[in-house]
Image: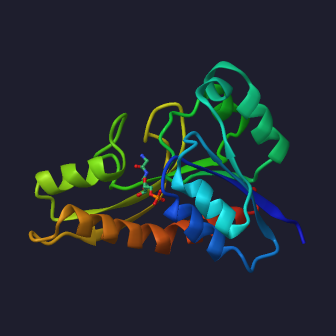
Amino acid sequence: MKTKNIVLLASGSGSNVENIVRYFQDRPDIVISAVLTNNKDAKVLERCDRLSISGLYFNRMSFYDTDCLLDILEAFNPDLIVLAGFLWKIPEKIIRAFPDRIINIHPALLPKYAGKGMYGNKVHRAVKANGDAETGITIHYVNENYDEGAIIHQAKTKIAAEDSVERIVEKIHGLEYEHFPKVIEKLLASPSR
Ligand code: GAR
């Protein structure tokens, strides 16, 4: 049995990280090698402790100005690098080193609500302010432009006029927890990987 391994990157709470870790915990053929974060105060590090997963903090220099993080990622030799609420732009050298092996989840129906500064609750507040009747999630490959890589999967949910931003967040998280691990599983099962 060939083991597949995933490296997760996250910047904040990490509820998607936890959901993915739990989804694969009974799968000896799929290993979460590590969770890497650019935020030393991120709640995701507490989740890593609780889940007995390696959680590593890195700073801006190691990501953008040196090859430190690139070397660390290459040492893991991941089948998939998964951005689960990760907010920094991925440098080109890392994208080049892992072609078609970096995916992101975005909490909107791309190409809507995309680009620098459009993340997390900012997206949901904009969706609410525009009175949209639906929103959703997009799982896509990462390229050198924010939120522009090829789309792998989208899922939608309706928004009622009375839904608060908090309710929209809940609906989006529900979609993320349902779809993200399954999409990862499917990608890892593809013969080209
Ligand atoms: C998720 O909703 C994810 O889609 C979003 O951040 C949230 C992280 O939640 N990602 C982005 O906005 C990326 N542009 P979590 O930390 O609880 O998993």
Is residue 156 shown to the viewer in this render?
Answer: no
Q: Is residue 159 left or right of residue 7?
A: left
Display coloring = rainbow
Q: In the picture provided, is 92 more to the left or to the right than 97?
A: left
Q: 44 and 124: which one is in front?
A: 44
Q: Name the residue rendered at 77%, 58% in the picture.
A: 5
| Extreme-top residue of the structure | 65
Question: Quick check: 64 above or below 152?
Answer: above
Residue 117 point in image, percent of width and height:
34, 36
* Quadrant of the image where one finds ligand 1: bottom left
Q: Is residue 165 above or below residue 39?
A: below
Q: Residue at x 75, y 53 (%)?
A: 79
Which residue is depicted at the point 32% across and 70% down?
170
Q: Picture quarter containing residue 64? A: top right
> Can residue 164 be seen at all in this image of the molecule?
yes
Q: Position of residue 161 (x, y in %)?
A: 9, 69
Q: Quadrant of residue 65?
A: top right
Nearer the observer, 127 or 133 = 127
Near-viewer residue (192 or 55): 55
User: How many badges with numbers are in the image?
Assistant: 0
Give coordinates of residue 169: x percent, y percent.
Answer: 31, 64
User: Measured along the vertical axis of the image, is residue 161 above or below residue 13?
Assistant: below
Q: Is residue 65 left or right of residue 105?
A: right
Q: Residue at x 33, y 46 (%)?
A: 111
